[in-house]
Image (tube, helix red, strand yellow):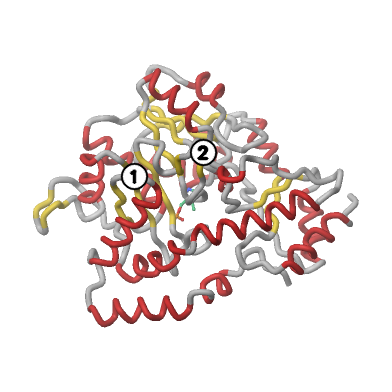
Amino acid sequence: MIPFLDLKKINLQYESEIKEVFNRVLQNGWFILGKEVKSFELNFAEYCGVRHCIGVANGLDALTLVLKAWKEIGKLSDGDEVIVQANTYIASILAITENNLVPVFVEPDPVTYNLSPSNIKRAITNKTKVILPVHLYGLISPMDEILAIAKEHNLLILEDCAQSHGAIIKNKRCGAWGDASGFSFYPGKNLGALGDGGAVTTNDEALADTIRALGNYGSHKKYYNDYLGVNSRLDEVQAAILNVKLKYLDKEIDKRRYVANKYLREIDNPFIQLPEIFDESSHVWHLFVIQTKNRDLLQKYLNERGIQTLVHYPIPPHKQKAYCQFNELSLPITEKIHDKVLSIPMSPVMTDEEIENVIDALNNYNM
Ligand SMILES: *Cc1c(COP(=O)(O)O)cnc(C)c1O
């Protein structure tokens, strides 16, 4: 079986270093908000090219806490609108509705799957306060154009970088373009912990301080609570492991690019639509997503040949039961994407033989 993503193999590459840092934390005896978290925050801020990084419990919390902090600071209030692409993972939308803000779903660019500047412009109203670009599947959004729109209309930008650690456009990494950004270190992400984890990046010191307090019971100083906060912290063990894995992130991205380039060059089948070829540095290939008319048939065919695939995602957020208030929205581009996409195996530990097996299977498919 060629697994979709072999997390065990990915992490065992660093077995001895991970055991070493785990032992260090164990011996230190300090598990929450200590020097491992501080050191990871500094390293990750430097990697992204920003002044501040705040570790939090997961990617959803990273996005939710940014919006919550903007409400505390007075930049947002209940009912303000957030423009977001309709084909994202539900976490991007939950962060918005959790804060009593209103998601304005816009159709993505059907080629890049990302927010399209012209659709953003059409969706702006006098209640719009935030643009939330999701760098879906690992491809960074056209941030220079989005930034220009935000400046013109005085809007905030919150980047969802959960799938795009390290992606670069116009010489700047994701996480450094927006007013703030949310990252996830869920094990399956390109930079993954051995459990849950997340972070916010920003250049805004006041925002960083507020988020730090909000994620720690609303307190800057122990037992003095300025806000109704939550408990959302990155822990020392995960931070220590992330410090190890961050050193190898760029190498792993290169391996993903190697797999992607082989797929792009060698998959050749009129029934299968490949992603467009982008500027190398803009895509970190969290997922390699193809499209085909009869997706479920292709998935079954590959499964019978021992190739595991996944669908990102089968149902868009506005069609979910939990969001019945949005079920009647009509977003045909988004809905068509959800019917046709299939994610094929992609990871930094695939062997040439595995890559070639996937290519052969796809080239021999004829439905
Ligand atoms: C994974 C993901 C999140 C949420 O991250 P968690 O750490 O699982 O909470 C948010 N947005 C996108 C686009 C994601 O893929």
Above or below 92: residue 3: below
What residue is drawn where x is 43% and y is 18%? 125
Q: Residue furthest left?
A: 224
Q: Residue furthest front?
A: 171
Q: Return the residue at label 1.
A: 50
Q: Who is closer to the viewer here, 358 or 218?
A: 358
Coordinates of residue 245 in the picture (x, y in percent): 45, 66
Which amino acid is tagged 1? Val
**Is residue 159 found left or right of 32 in the rendered image?**
right
As drawn, the label of residue 303 is none
What residue is drawn where x is 35% and y is 35%? 179
Which amino acid is tagged 2? Ile
Q: The N terminus lies in which quarter of the figure?
A: bottom right
Q: Who is closer to the viewer here, 314 or 234?
A: 234
Q: Quick one: label 1, few (<14), some, or many (20+) residues within 10 Å?
A: some
**Is residue 88 found left or right of 111 in the rendered image?**
left
Pick whichever of labels 2 and 1 is earlier in the sequence: 1
What residue is drawn where x is 47% and y is 59%? 191
What residue is drawn where x is 12% and y is 51%? 225
As drawn, the label of residue 169 is 2
Alpha-carbon distance for marks 2 and 1?
A: 15 Å
Q: Who is closer to the viewer here, 256 or 81?
A: 256
Secondary structure beneath label 2: strand
Residues under numbered marks 2 and 1 in contact, where contact means CB atoms less than 8 Å apart? no
Q: Quadrant of residue 242?
A: bottom left
Count of numbered circles in the view: 2
